[in-house]
Image (cartoon, helix red, strand yellow):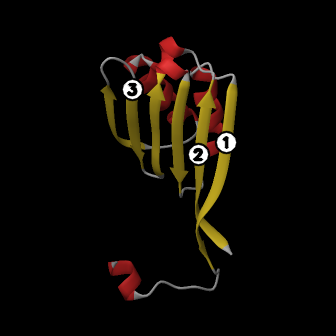
Amino acid sequence: MKALGTHLLLELQDCKPELLDDITHIEQAMISAALESGATIVGKSFHKFSPMGVTGILSISESHISVHTWPELGYAAADIFTCGEEFKPMNAAHLLIERLGCKDPHITEIKRGLIAQTATPTLAAVEG
Protein backbone atom coordinates (compact mmCIF):
# COMPACT_ATOMS: atom_id res chain seq x y z
CA MET A 1 0.00 0.00 0.00
CA LYS A 2 1.14 3.48 -0.84
CA ALA A 3 0.07 6.51 1.17
CA LEU A 4 -0.99 9.67 -0.63
CA GLY A 5 -0.05 11.80 2.35
CA THR A 6 1.25 12.15 5.87
CA HIS A 7 -0.82 13.84 8.58
CA LEU A 8 0.89 14.93 11.79
CA LEU A 9 -1.18 15.82 14.85
CA LEU A 10 0.77 17.81 17.42
CA GLU A 11 -0.28 18.04 21.05
CA LEU A 12 1.94 20.83 22.40
CA GLN A 13 1.80 21.12 26.17
CA ASP A 14 3.87 23.28 28.49
CA CYS A 15 4.50 25.98 25.86
CA LYS A 16 5.41 29.58 26.65
CA PRO A 17 2.06 31.35 27.14
CA GLU A 18 3.33 34.73 25.90
CA LEU A 19 4.36 33.15 22.58
CA LEU A 20 1.00 31.41 22.19
CA ASP A 21 -0.82 34.74 22.50
CA ASP A 22 1.39 36.63 20.04
CA ILE A 23 -0.20 36.53 16.57
CA THR A 24 2.91 37.97 14.91
CA HIS A 25 5.11 35.33 16.51
CA ILE A 26 2.72 32.51 15.57
CA GLU A 27 2.55 33.69 11.96
CA GLN A 28 6.33 34.06 11.66
CA ALA A 29 6.94 30.69 13.35
CA MET A 30 4.55 28.89 11.01
CA ILE A 31 5.82 30.58 7.85
CA SER A 32 9.47 29.98 8.66
CA ALA A 33 8.80 26.35 9.67
CA ALA A 34 6.97 25.78 6.38
CA LEU A 35 9.62 27.41 4.20
CA GLU A 36 12.57 25.83 6.03
CA SER A 37 10.93 22.42 5.57
CA GLY A 38 10.41 22.79 1.82
CA ALA A 39 6.75 23.84 1.62
CA THR A 40 5.34 26.28 -0.92
CA ILE A 41 2.92 28.71 0.74
CA VAL A 42 -0.11 29.61 -1.40
CA GLY A 43 -2.30 31.33 1.22
CA LYS A 44 -2.60 32.23 4.89
CA SER A 45 -5.12 33.34 7.48
CA PHE A 46 -4.56 34.28 11.13
CA HIS A 47 -6.90 35.50 13.87
CA LYS A 48 -6.28 36.83 17.41
CA PHE A 49 -9.02 36.01 19.90
CA SER A 50 -10.12 38.18 22.81
CA PRO A 51 -9.12 37.93 25.56
CA MET A 52 -6.44 35.49 24.37
CA GLY A 53 -5.49 32.84 21.85
CA VAL A 54 -4.51 32.65 18.22
CA THR A 55 -5.58 30.47 15.33
CA GLY A 56 -3.73 30.28 12.05
CA ILE A 57 -3.62 28.29 8.87
CA LEU A 58 -1.18 28.15 6.01
CA SER A 59 -2.41 26.73 2.75
CA ILE A 60 0.57 25.11 1.11
CA SER A 61 0.86 23.47 -2.30
CA GLU A 62 1.43 20.24 -0.40
CA SER A 63 -1.78 20.72 1.71
CA HIS A 64 -1.87 22.71 5.00
CA ILE A 65 -0.38 23.63 8.38
CA SER A 66 -2.66 24.89 11.15
CA VAL A 67 -2.30 25.95 14.80
CA HIS A 68 -4.79 26.86 17.50
CA THR A 69 -3.55 28.11 20.88
CA TRP A 70 -4.77 28.25 24.47
CA PRO A 71 -2.19 30.53 26.17
CA GLU A 72 -3.94 30.29 29.53
CA LEU A 73 -3.22 26.54 29.48
CA GLY A 74 0.19 26.72 27.81
CA TYR A 75 -1.26 24.46 25.11
CA ALA A 76 -1.37 24.48 21.31
CA ALA A 77 -2.86 22.02 18.84
CA ALA A 78 -1.13 21.88 15.46
CA ASP A 79 -1.95 19.98 12.32
CA ILE A 80 0.44 19.35 9.43
CA PHE A 81 -0.81 17.52 6.34
CA THR A 82 1.25 16.93 3.24
CA CYS A 83 1.00 14.99 0.04
CA GLY A 84 4.29 16.26 -1.40
CA GLU A 85 7.69 14.64 -1.62
CA GLU A 86 9.83 17.76 -1.13
CA PHE A 87 8.14 19.05 2.04
CA LYS A 88 9.35 17.38 5.24
CA PRO A 89 6.44 17.57 7.73
CA MET A 90 8.42 16.18 10.69
CA ASN A 91 11.01 18.95 10.24
CA ALA A 92 8.21 21.53 10.31
CA ALA A 93 6.78 19.90 13.45
CA HIS A 94 10.10 20.10 15.30
CA LEU A 95 10.59 23.73 14.25
CA LEU A 96 7.11 24.64 15.58
CA ILE A 97 7.83 22.81 18.83
CA GLU A 98 11.04 24.80 19.26
CA ARG A 99 9.54 28.17 18.29
CA LEU A 100 6.59 27.82 20.67
CA GLY A 101 8.90 26.97 23.55
CA CYS A 102 7.17 23.61 24.01
CA LYS A 103 8.59 21.39 26.74
CA ASP A 104 6.10 18.50 26.39
CA PRO A 105 5.32 17.72 22.73
CA HIS A 106 3.46 14.66 21.46
CA ILE A 107 3.30 13.86 17.74
CA THR A 108 0.93 11.37 16.15
CA GLU A 109 1.63 10.41 12.54
CA ILE A 110 -1.15 9.10 10.34
CA LYS A 111 -0.75 7.86 6.79
CA ARG A 112 -3.63 9.15 4.66
CA GLY A 113 -5.00 7.89 1.36
CA LEU A 114 -3.75 4.33 1.58
CA ILE A 115 -4.16 2.89 -1.90
CA ALA A 116 -2.99 -0.21 -3.68
CA GLN A 117 -0.01 0.61 -5.88
CA THR A 118 -1.75 -1.02 -8.84
CA ALA A 119 -4.81 1.23 -8.52
CA THR A 120 -5.49 3.64 -11.35
CA PRO A 121 -7.90 6.55 -11.05
CA THR A 122 -11.20 6.33 -12.86
CA LEU A 123 -12.84 9.28 -14.55
CA ALA A 124 -15.52 9.30 -11.85
CA ALA A 125 -12.85 9.49 -9.13
CA VAL A 126 -11.03 12.31 -10.92
CA GLU A 127 -14.23 14.34 -11.43
CA GLY A 128 -15.04 13.67 -7.81
Compared to residue 119, the image places residue 97 above or below, namely above
Could one spot residue 88 in this view of the protein? no
Taking depth in this image into account, of 103 and 70 the one nearest to the observer is: 70
Residue at image location 47% in from the left, 83% down from the top: 121
The 10 Å Cα crowd at callout 2, few under 14, some 14 to 19, many 20 or more, is some
Q: Tell me the quadrant of the picture where the C terminus can be found.
A: bottom left
Mark 3 lies on a secondary structure that is strand
Q: Are marks 1 and 3 in contact (CB under 8 Å)?
A: no
Q: Residues within 10 Å of mark 3 (few under 14, many from 20)?
A: many
**Residue 107: mark in rendering:** 1
Instruction: Tell me if label 1 and label 2 are in contact, CB under 8 Å.
Output: yes
Q: Amino acid at mark 3?
A: Val
Is 11 rendered above or below residue 102? below
- The residue located at (32%, 24%) in the rendering is 49
88 in relation to 95, above or below: below
Q: Label 1, label 3: how many angstroms apart (C-alpha)?
A: 20 Å
Q: Which quarter of the rendering shows the N terminus?
A: bottom right
Q: Which residue is mark 2?
A: 9
Q: Earlier in the sequence, mark 1 or mark 3?
A: 3
Residue lying farthest to the top in this orientation:
18
* Image quarter of residue 100: top right
Badge 1: how crowded within 10 Å, few (<14), some, or many (20+)? some
* 3D distance between C-alphas at marks 2 and 3: 17 Å
Q: Which badge, 2 or 3, comes first in the chain's sequence?
A: 2
Q: Which residue is mark 3?
A: 54
Q: Residue at x 43, y 88 (%)?
A: 122
- Residue 72: x %, y % from top left: 48, 18
Amino acid type at circle 2 is: Leu
Percent across and percent down for residue 14 are 63, 21
Q: Secondary structure at mark 1?
A: strand
Q: Quadrant of residue 68?
A: top left
